[in-house]
Amino acid sequence: MDWSQRTVLITGASSGIGRALALELDRRGAHLVLAARRREALEAVRDSCMAPERHQVLVLDVEDAAALPGKAAEAERLAGPIDILVNNAGISLRGLIVETDIAVDRRIMEVNYFGAVALTKALLPGMIARGDGHIVVVSSIVGHISTPMRSAYAASKHAVHGFFDALRAEVHDKGVRVTLVLPGYVATDISLHALGPDGNPTGQMDTNQAGGMAPGLCARRMADAIERGRAEVIISGPYERFGRWLGRHLPALFRIIVRRERPK
Ligand SMILES: NC(=O)c1ccc[n+]([C@@H]2O[C@H](COP(=O)([O-])OP(=O)(O)OC[C@H]3O[C@@H](n4cnc5c(N)ncnc54)[C@H](OP(=O)(O)O)[C@@H]3O)[C@@H](O)[C@H]2O)c1
């Protein structure tokens, strides 16, 4: 794959996995549109690139689905046709269902699910018309299993699988590929940014998070999966892979074990 001929729009490029993917694809020669809410952080990512002049910054809020068609058009005005959309922006949850305000559940669905859906719908017609495109979605291992205190987060990632598996089948003959990426623990600020039951960020770094995979390694494996056009890729250590295996093959045992699971 010749990355120098590809323009990639990455949401959530201002930190964590999105930032690491931006740096990796910059090294591979791609043209990038770096998107998120914080302009200064996006500019700092662009400045860290080997070829910052190849890349554009686009301020957007994926929670504002109505604005996303305009933002997609702005991205294409800045950088030309988007060949690859990476729906990576996301927020997590740390709260028991019984104490979490429903507004928090809705917000997480807006960002993690409807944001990805709306941006995809805005760019898909162009990809189909060109007979060429690739939609990448960053889900999670919790897109396959659910664990306590992450209910809406797990639900949003399950929803992503339902939608994008259907999309993959619909556009298979139109030259558009769909890749779902399922990371396990990656050492980013996601738990710091995770919403608590009242909708405010918890501001707490989980030990599992801090000890997770390096974002750079996750990004390299994501870039390889995109190059190969993989339908779905799990990027995790053995602990998370075992959890998924248990959930699939010994669901009754998994349901018992998961009762004690807490973010830590
Ligand atoms: N870290 C992990 O262990 C892990 C595991 C599995 C899956 N994931 C997934 O990986 C993705 C990236 O997470 P991360 O770990 O890199 O966390 P992170 O460091 O907190 O990054 C989240 C990114 O999403 C952006 N974002 C959040 N809300 C947004 C909004 N409303 N509009 C636009 N951008 C928004 C943030 O940028 P701004 O604040 O500048 O808007 C930031 O760039 C998420 O989808 C997450 O669910 C992470």
Image (tube, rainbow, N blue to C red):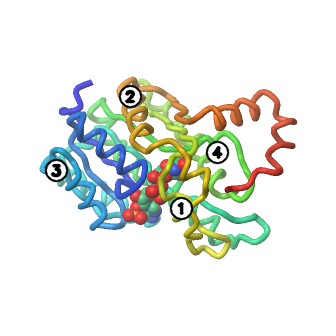
Of label 4 and label 3, which has the lower sequence position?
Answer: 3
Residue 200 image position (x, y, % from top left): 58, 75
Q: Which mark is residue 126?
A: none
Q: Classify residue 114 as left or right of residue 53.
A: right
Q: Classify residue 41 as left or right of residue 164.
A: left
Asked whether residue 62 is in view, the answer is no
Q: Residue at x 26, y 51 (%)?
A: 33
> Cα distance, mark 2 to mark 1?
29 Å
> Cα distance, mark 3 to mark 2?
22 Å
Q: Secondary structure at mark 3?
A: helix
Residue 37 image position (x, y, % from top left): 36, 66
Of label 4 and label 1, which has the lower sequence position?
Answer: 1
Cβ–Cβ below 8 Å for labels 2 and 1? Answer: no
**Badge 4: how crowded within 10 Å, few (<14), some, or many (20+)?**
many
Q: Residue at x 57, y 41 (%)?
A: 184
Q: Amino acid at mark 2?
A: Asp
Query: Does the beta carbon at disc 1 come under 8 Å from ligand 1?
Result: yes
Q: Classify residue 244 as left or right of residue 36.
A: right
Query: Does the beta carbon at disc 4 come under 8 Å from ligand 1?
Result: yes
